[in-house]
Amino acid sequence: MQIEVRQKEKEETVTAPPSTPVAVWGLSFAGPLSTRWARLDLPGGVRAPVGDWTGERTSQGAGWLGFLADASDLLAGTLDPDMVPALIAQIVVPRLATWCAVYTADSGDGQQELAYLWHADESKIDTLREQLDEAAIPSPENLRPLPLQLPEWQSLAFPLVARGRSLGVMCLGRAGRFPDDVAQLAEDLGRRAALAMDNARLYAQQADANRALQRSLLPPGTPAVTPGLDYSVVYEPAGENNEVGGDFYDLFATGESTWRFAIGDVCGTGPEAAAVTGLARHTIRLLAREGYEVGAVLSRLNQAILEEGDRARFLTLLHGEIVRTGDGLDLSLISAGHPEALRLRPSGVVEAVVTSQSLLGVFPEAEFVAERVHLAPGDVLLGVTDGVTERRSGARLLDDDGGLAKLLAECAELSARAVAERIHRAVQDFAVEPSADDLAILVLRAEQP
């Protein structure tokens, strides 16, 4: 026996002999009062507070609170509507019930579908599924837990309701009666699960709407492979789950031997930048097919952006017309504040081919004049956005000291696709960190018709 004496007013602490369930007991004195107390070591290493002979109940209450907290964290950790029912069932089994079935009512026709079924004994899932198919599952509009009639099981159905909307039903079953505290806990868990389901549903709807909008900002397609013109495009928006960022590109036919192309970068991000992206791409296509030459297209696009008022965002753009000739491609180009376009000769010589003119969406009086560039067979024209030229590694940028031109010089005699992939790979390898900016790469290569 080990004895420890601690003084407050006067207090004795004695370690109990192994034969007693009491781990530590003692006698405390405070003035004229004396207090006998004991401390219990409970299963699982949980120690009851001093003076509390109901340690098991206290431990279980604390355990339930931790269980609910962990369940809430798990449910809040997914925004996939298909994953939430699976999480609900696997949280419930086997802690609260032997099995759990989650029904959802998202179809809009009032019908509930079994979204997920889980049983502590997986071999019994098929039999349970058959029983549930024949059972009358209560409607989630019944806002109270209801008994569910199933052979061999004591079952309860809990409505899943969030923000006044009925989302489904959570059905639980066990061999014996549901204790009151377990039923109350399941009801609380059902409310949290319903909120997680509704959050995931709202997120999925918003994500679908965003993807639909983003897809509308991308070109519907690129021209079929045509004799005389070899081309390739790499487009990579920054951030997770993005399909479209502030950068954009387009390439489309305007005649049997003529094409238009564009590669641009809208200032900023979010809906305002997306609006300018859509405006620019659709305006260029419409005006080009109406026969407007390159300078006129940019002048009218500049005016259209300015008319957006407070929603306007300035835009850098490389836009050009391509005409196939007997000895290559004739290009009519304008760079509106965009990173310079580079021409690669088969010999490996690289040179900038157009001078930068005014940004779009800044000056109402801006005028744009096209420059003529010829691509002989084997020549390559490279256009990029600043997600390439300004790719950063520490204090260095990829295009420092003509870095992009040096990369392009190594691509002589490569196809358009090989050039685009070589540049893209160099951007990725330039820094360890993921790029924080969108990028677009457009490569045009003249071939012998």
Image (spheres, rainbow, N blue to C red):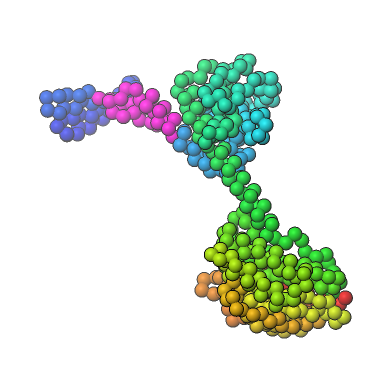
Q: Residue at x 57, y 37 (%)?
A: 197
- Judge from the rendering whether residue 388 lies leftward or rightward of residue 226; answer left or right: left
Q: Residue at x 85, y 73 (%)?
A: 257
Q: Residue at x 83, y 80 (%)?
A: 328
Does the image show residue 291? Answer: yes
In the rendering, at what x and y percent does residue 385 appear?
Answer: 63, 71
189 up-or-down from 183: above or below: below
355 up-or-down from 67: above or below: below
Q: Residue at x 17, y 34 (%)?
A: 8
Q: Nearer the viewer, residue 203 or 2?
A: 203
Part of the protein shown in magenta: 37-66
In the rendering, at what x and y percent does residue 313 appear?
Answer: 57, 67
Reply yes or no: does residue 55 show up in magenta. Answer: yes
Q: Nearer the viewer, residue 433 or 278?
A: 278
Reply yes or no: does residue 42 show up in magenta. Answer: yes
Which of the 4 image quadrants contains residue 273?
A: bottom right
| Quadrant in which the N terminus is drawn | top left
Single out the residue that lies furthest toward the left. 32
